[in-house]
Image (tube, grey):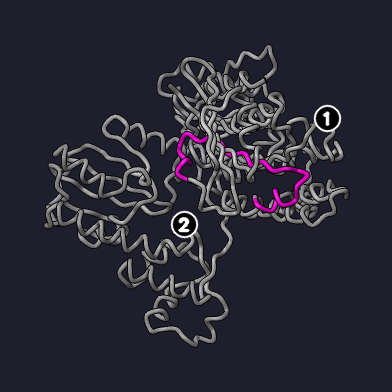
Amino acid sequence: MRIGELLVVSPPGKLCEQFIASVCDVLEQKNDETCYGRMPVNDELAVHIYGVQLNGNIDAVSWDLISPKLLGYILLFDWDDADSLEKLSPTLDIFSAQFHAPLMIVGCVKNTTKIPMSPDFYEVAGIPIEKETRFSFCTATDPISARKIVATLIDILLEKV
Amino acid sequence: MKSHEKDKILIIDEDSNYIGGLRKSLNQAGYDVLSFDDPHKALEIIQDIHPQMIIADVDLTENADYSFFKHVQTIPELKNIPFIVMSNQKRVDDRIRTIELGVDDFISKPFYVEEVVARVENLFKEIEELQNHEEYSTNGFGGNLGEKNVIELIKTLESEKKNAIIHLKQGQFEGSIFVYQGNVHDAVFEDFEADEALTKLIVWTEGRYFIEYTDFNRPKVIVQPNELIIEFGRERIEQWDKIKYNLPPLTSALYITELTSTKNNISDDERKLISTLNGSKIIYEMVVQSPFDDIKALELIFKLYEKGYLKESDSPFSDEKKKVASLFKEKVNTPKNGDTSHLLHNLLQNNPQEPSDQDEDRRQDDRRQTDDRRKMSDRRRTHRIFNQKLFLNKTELMMIREKLL
């Protein structure tokens, strides 16, 4: 079985599990701080998505999840909640300093058809801040929207291979 | 001396405008370059030249027959030579089709010469790593030291009673431990040998390992039995981890702050350590290069760090993303109903890695459109930052993508 892993990080709340549930259809496991979903692609290939909630304490994260199978990271924050964003800033720094994998920074909104930005600044797949880091919007409860985020991350990888 | 110094690169492009600059830069990078503007002529003598890499302009349109590439593939001694395609074709489908044919890399025209040189360097490096890996894979196994540390590896080999070399790699550092019939026999690390090298390597709990089952011909210079080595190692790791816990990751860089000029409360040993530092340095590098025992060196670093004489400097990879972080912080301070789009716009406009106006003037070329420059620049940056081998291959990634959309 070939497995690709994704790490989703969000501030405390429902974002993480909503996002993973949208991508994987079903959450396989969850507890107070972490959750896990599995998206089978076929009999030989699957994507495992680990969700971690941050509560301002980066040491609480099980960074051991980072493994050679990791495809990339997705940082979710609530676009309308400034605190949500503040909590993720240190994580951004950690990713920057430690890991070399694509990063999707995702502003979660209730409705992606009403994105609070000028369309000049983003493309369908996200804003190319740089090739291995992209910013995009998403509705965590919407499977199409959430899956688009993962697809964008896969696109970054496809650019590489 | 660079290992590629004698590598021969063959460039084929009917447009000689591209060849000149590329040839010059690759020459400057130490490569021997031969160029042709006629693929047929190149084919006539390619077997005599026997290049180590081919860079060729290829027509990617649907009717293209890739005849040059296919012909090269029919020559047994050339079919494994890395092949880079240059093309004006921008469509991703076409690129994928080209890579599916077995081409190693793809470069869109117009390009920056520096980008091509960087890609050539990277491709040679990747091939070398792959060859090393394949060589190892046939006769051993590897993994992450975070999952299995040096002590556990020694114990594994002890139980197997085999001859093997434990290859260790942590950032820029590499070392080896030689195990004979399950017993630690010798070790090398940087300029250190035997017990000294083993003392340094045994605390490694980060980085990669590879166990190569092989016979070797070296005298036994480490006389302690495994049992003592393991016990000693455990104690060292415990001490090491205690100090490490209070420091940034060992791969972080620290620099000497201006406070050291006052040198109020610096001990002689701390002063001695500072004297070995010059500019910012990775913590583990400081340890290795210090005149002290590793634990002692790490302790001194911690004390200096605690007193504010050493401070963490920016990671070489963090600049771009720190911009994003600061952008987000700006957003936090922006009234909710305010228009934040200008912040992202600013980020894109002020990206320091984009070519400056002056650079653009200098690189002015009628063929090169501004958008293309930006894309090229982005791709070059991507190539630099992505240095980790992907676990999944392109087909698998495409299958995932298909499933998602």
Residue B199, visible in the rendered structure:
yes
Residue range in magenta is: A63-87
Say which residue appears at 56% left-offset and 27% top-offset. Answer: A27
Check residue B242 for magenta coloring: no
The x, y position of residue B389, in whole percent, is 48, 36
Residue B43, visible in the rendered structure:
no
Give the residue pinned by disc 2. Answer: B251
Q: Nearer the viewer, residue B265 or B386?
A: B265
Q: Nearer the viewer, residue B372 or B282?
A: B282
Instruction: Calculate the distance from the C-alpha at mark 2 to the C-alpha at mark 1.
Output: 43 Å
Residue A143 lies in quadrant: top right
Q: Amino acid at mark 1?
A: Thr
Q: Secondary structure at mark 1?
A: helix
Q: Amino acid at mark 2?
A: Thr
Q: Is residue B211 left or right of residue B381?
A: left
Q: Nearer the viewer, residue B113 or A156?
A: A156
The x, y position of residue A54, in whole percent, is 59, 47
Say which residue appears at 17% left-offset and 50% top-offset. Answer: B184
Give the residue pinned by disc 1. Answer: A113
